């Protein structure tokens, strides 16, 4: 009897634990986006975006990476005394991508684009100090109205404005309606 009770309790706990893992609330979507942004984790961010926005965001990452790797390579190759740790980081990324036959100047296949984004995004986050804990906004509240929702966030800076992040329901999932609001 005790063995059976342990089995029932473990099944219940397993179901309880996993039922919370898949929760997709407006708060959790915004939090995952903020966490992904501060941690340089594109996968976390992409789960908060629809396909079009995911593509736009990844294209922006590729563009920024191309700019930063070009600048870094110029500084490193010219032995510029202004070269810094970020230049070294982007220079290493450039070299690593070339070794994988990935050139950021040309249209990339989805597979190569994914590799480049996952390599570049953490460095871009670092270069913009997006992982600075003082810059990470906090969630104040959320409101759901049918297939639309809004989440109020505030930066952790003095006199920071409150921003309202809009979300839309697509199928069973909440997605950001305009991810650019998180950058304002």
Image (cartoon, rainbow, N blue to C red):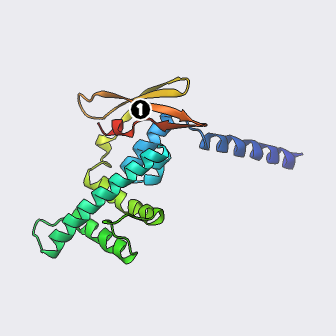
Residue 126, x across and y down, in percent: 29, 55
Image vertical order of residue 5 relative to residue 155, above or below: below
The residue sitting at the bottom extreme is 99
Of 142 and 49, nearer the camera is 49
The C terminus lies in which quarter of the figure? top left
The residue sitting at the front extreme is 107
Residue 168, x across and y down, in percent: 50, 32
Please say whether residue 122 is visible from this viewpoint. Answer: no
Q: Is residue 179 left or right of residue 94?
A: right
Image vertical order of residue 136 relative to residue 79, above or below: above
Q: Residue at x 32, y 65 (%)?
A: 104
The N terminus lies in which quarter of the figure? top right
Q: Is residue 80 left or right of residue 126?
A: left
Image vertical order of residue 67 relative to residue 139, above or below: below
Residue 112 position by quadrant: bottom left
Q: Residues within 10 Å of mark 1 (few under 14, many from 20)?
A: some
Please say whether residue 69 is visible from this viewpoint. Answer: yes
Image vertical order of residue 48 relative to residue 64, above or below: above
Q: Residue at x 68, y 40 (%)?
A: 16
Residue 81 position by quadrant: bottom left
Residue 42, x across and y down, in percent: 43, 53
The residue sitting at the left extreme is 81
Instruction: Residue under label 1, please give it.
Output: 139
Q: Residue at x 23, y 31 (%)?
A: 158
Q: Residue at x 12, y 74 (%)?
A: 78
Report helix, strand or loop for mark 1: strand
Of 70 and 123, nearer the camera is 70
């Amino acid at each position: 009897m005790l063995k059976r009770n342990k089995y029932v309790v473990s099944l219940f706990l397993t179901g309880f634990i996993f039922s919370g893992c898949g929760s997709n609330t407006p708060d959790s979507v915004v939090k995952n986006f903020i966490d992904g942004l501060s941690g340089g984790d594109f996968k976390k961010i992409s789960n908060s975006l629809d396909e079009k926005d995911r593509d736009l965001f990844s294209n922006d990452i590729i563009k920024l990476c191309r700019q930063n790797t070009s600048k870094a390579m110029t500084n490193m190759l010219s032995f510029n005394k202004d070269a810094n740790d970020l230049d070294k980081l982007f220079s290493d990324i450039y070299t690593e991508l070339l070794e994988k036959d990935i050139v950021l100047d040309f249209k990339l296949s989805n597979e190569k684009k994914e590799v480049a984004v996952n390599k570049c995004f953490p460095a871009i986050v670092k270069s913009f100090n997006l992982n600075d804990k003082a810059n990470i906004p906090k969630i104040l509240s959320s409101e759901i109205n049918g297939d639309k929702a809004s989440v109020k966030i505030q930066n952790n800076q003095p006199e920071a404005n409150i921003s309202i992040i809009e979300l839309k329901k697509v199928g069973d999932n909440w997605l950001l309606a305009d991810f650019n609001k998180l950058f304002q």
